[in-house]
Amino acid sequence: MRATTNPGRTLIACGLTLATLLLTLTASVAGAASPAITRQATSANAVFLAYAPAPPTAAKALCLVDSGVNATPDTTPGLVSATALDGGTGADVDPLWHGTIDAAIAGGAGHGVLGAWPQLKIVSVRATDIPSPGQKPSFQFDDYVAGIIKCSQDMPSVQVAAIVLPLSSVIPPTPDQVEEFASAVAQAQSKGISILAAAGNEPGPTQLPGNQPGILAVGAGNRGTIPCSFSPTTGLTFFAPGCGLDQIDTAGNAFCCGNGTSQASAFAAGVLVALRSYDPALTAARAVELLLTTTHNNGQLDATAAFRAAGLGAVVDAGDAATPKPPVPQPLPGAASLPTTPAGGARRVPRPSVRSVTWRRGVLQIRLKSIPKGARLHAKVTFARRKPMNLVTKGLRLRARTPPPKRLQLRQSRAGVSSATVSIRVIRLRR
């Protein structure tokens, strides 16, 4: 994380080097609706939760301390309020929609992404400042404290069950700040509120505030037994889906793929609030214990196991029964011995028709002349010292923040058929 210093104040840049969105793309054409079953739900054995019946009492709320939340088809149904510590707008002030994407990951209604629990209520508290045009929003350690205190206040319409802090920091707080933070955490705990935090997006130890007592730090995991390459692991025992995620882009449309411990913490928080909503008598401490003691694959979130351990197996079964099942293709009579074609009778997909590929000031931009109807563009970007990045869009333009690219490979796919892969030269612009 980068820090900039202003007179009398240390600011923490809220951008791609936070526990934030490692990858956020904006397609020029609206994407398709959210998958009925997201990658993260499958990874965390949480598919049932998106289709579970309503809880016995009103759904509890998650208080999201982030960069604000924009009203989108995914966030609006569950958004109780959107305020700011500075008294200004509660809308998302991050150009990359950090807070909005986290809110959708936790409780998206299914327009662009189906959240961990679509019935989730969200109370948004913007903790960052409003940046100047072209700049990233920033925040300071005291904003963690103020955010927790605000989330702990009694609310007339909902009961907050958990607070999530997706913005992380590597700047050490002062002893006084540590004491104030501990006091705020104790205040939240006294009201039965759990606190989760992103672990950070750099390998090694957990970053602030996830490394503080009373905080459940969340690393980024995947379907295997190894955490995502960017996730901290030292001393970390709990991981939620954090790489190759279905999410929304900055137009509110479906997008794949996102990465980050911010999304991981938001997803885990959504599951925790759901757990306490279906069992209103469950304490904050017991809910966290259930998440930690039912993990699979070396510490990765297992929502099904947590619900069953809480005696909520009926919720799992009902959600599973309501989950859409993929249609089973029925062969035509006498066609079994005939050569088959790809689904939908798809034909050969042409190679990408590229107009230009440029990289400037940390932004990779790919423009196409055309793209076949129903096709997707797949871009594999390799770097000198980082693992490759895989990008996907259905539009004519794809933009992503990346390190300087070393190599770019493009292909198109449609209905399970892929074109030949082409290597493209990236033009680096100085201005």
Image (spheres, rainbow, N blue to C red):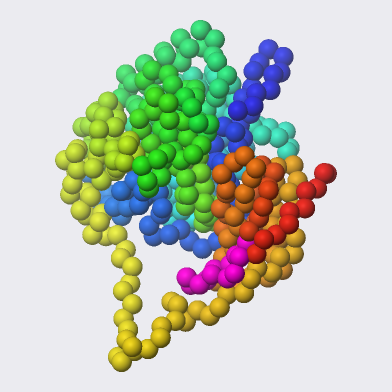
The correct choice, above or below, for 368 with respect to 60 in the image is below
Q: Can residue 305 be seen in this snapshot?
A: yes
Quadrant hosting residue 89: top right
Q: Residue at x 56, y 44 (%)?
A: 387
Q: Residue at x 51, y 7 (%)?
A: 175
Is 1 on the left or on the right of 58, as rendered? right
Residue in the foreground of this view, choosing between 392 and 142: 392
Q: Is residue 134 magenta?
A: no
Quadrant hosting residue 276: top left
Q: Is residue 420 magenta?
A: yes
Q: Residue at x 18, y 46 (%)?
A: 313
Question: In this view, which residue lies farthest toward the bottom?
Answer: 334
Residue in the foreground of this view, choosing between 348 and 288: 348
| Residue 250 x, y percent position in the rendering | 59, 49
| Residue 155 x, y percent position in the rendering | 39, 30
* Image quarter hosting the N terminus: top right
Residue in the foreground of this view, choosing between 132 and 410: 410
Q: Residue at x 29, y 60 (%)?
A: 323
Is 366 on the left or on the right of 174, as rendered? right
Question: In this view, which residue lies farthest toward the right?
Answer: 431
Q: Can residue 97 be seen in this snapshot?
A: no
| Residue 282 x, y percent position in the rendering | 22, 32
Quadrant hosting residue 192: top left
The correct choice, above or below, for 353 with respect to 79 in the image is below
The correct choice, above or below, for 247 with respect to 15 in the image is below
* Image quarter hosting the C terminus: top right
Is 301 on the left or on the right of 367, as rendered? left
| Residue 98 x, y percent position in the rendering | 56, 40
The correct choice, above or below, for 340 with respect to 242 in the image is below
Instruction: Point out the stretch of residues depicted in magenta.
Output: 410-421
